[in-house]
Amino acid sequence: MYHSVADPTEDPYNITVSPDRLDAQLTWLARRGLRGVSMDRLLEACRRGQGHGLVGLTFDDGYADFLDHAVPLLHRHACTATVFVLPGRLGGDNAWDPLGPRKPLLDADGIRGAAEQGMEVASHGLTHVDLTRADDRTLRREVADSRSAVADLTGRDVGGFCYPYGHADPRVLAAVRAAGYAYACAIAPGDLTGPLALPRIHVGQRDTALRLRLKQATGGPRGRTLRPGHTPLPAAVTA
């Protein structure tokens, strides 16, 4: 579970990795016999029984630096990824983070560019609200309308959703199912774990090779293991 790829000097929420660190982390995956792919490709490979050695890479919030910094590195390592975007905040910033710093989000052209670069573009809701606290009307709008909006931007079907803040409950999961999503990513969904609440492993700027090996062995502080042959419910690497 990645977010921003930029200078991590000011990073109170631990959501930023530097391009150099991302490069090193993708190199580490390759040396372990793992390759990063988008969630749609990972899930399809698992359905065919061909998920061995694949790891889902996700980038939440749709920061503009995904296109500037992450995509070139993903291409260099022959990887793809899923970027979860906010079509209700096109060209805006992460106003939901009170401590900042303000980071620009992808605009319409950036979202289309990510799709044209071979990345899966999926929904993170419209505006990044905690859906477990939303009323029913807001919940439907954030879940269903965001799917339509992303599809209109990319000209492609949108199969994936990501819960803002990783928060989900049975009511929210039901709304995601009703909207027609094929899968959804959470962080540590507990009893809700399944195709519409996939857990993920957080990876940050401090995650060097040693820390990554520990997370591979333990499943990290929130998520599943990166064991190459273990893919009944695929893991998604995040940072």
Image: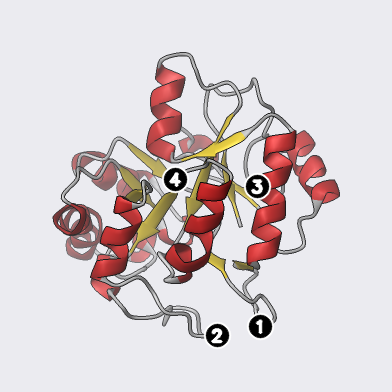
- On the image, the x and y values in percent for residue 185 come to 44, 45
Q: Secondary structure at mark 4?
A: strand
Label 3, residues with CA under 10 Å away: few <14, some 14-19, many ≥20: many
Label 1, residues with CA under 10 Å away: few <14, some 14-19, many ≥20: few
Between discs 2 and 1, the one toward the N terminus: 1
| 127 sits left or right of 59 in the view | left
Q: Which mark is residue 185?
A: 4
- On the image, the x and y values in percent for residue 179 come to 19, 44
Tag 2 and tag 1, C-beta contact below 8 Å: yes
- Measure how far apart labels 3 and 4 are at the Cα level: 21 Å
Nearer to us of marks 4 and 2 is 2
Nearer to us of marks 1 and 3 is 3
Query: Which residue appears at 29% of the width and 72% of the height?
Result: 107
- Measure how far apart labels 2 and 1 are at the Cα level: 7 Å
Q: Which of the two residues, 162 or 64, is positioned nearer the viewer here?
A: 64
- Residue type at mark 4? Cys
- Residue type at mark 1? Glu
- On the image, the x and y values in percent for residue 74 come to 53, 50
Query: Which residue appears at 31% of the width and 70% of the height?
Result: 127
- Measure how far apart labels 1 and 3 are at the Cα level: 23 Å
Q: On the image, numbered disc 1 is attached to which residue? A: 10
Nearer to us of marks 4 and 1 is 1
Q: On the image, numbered disc 3 is attached to which residue? A: 26
Residue 100: quarter of image:
bottom right
Q: Secondary structure at mark 3?
A: helix
Q: On the image, numbered disc 2 is attached to which residue? A: 101
Tag 1 and tag 3, C-beta contact below 8 Å: no
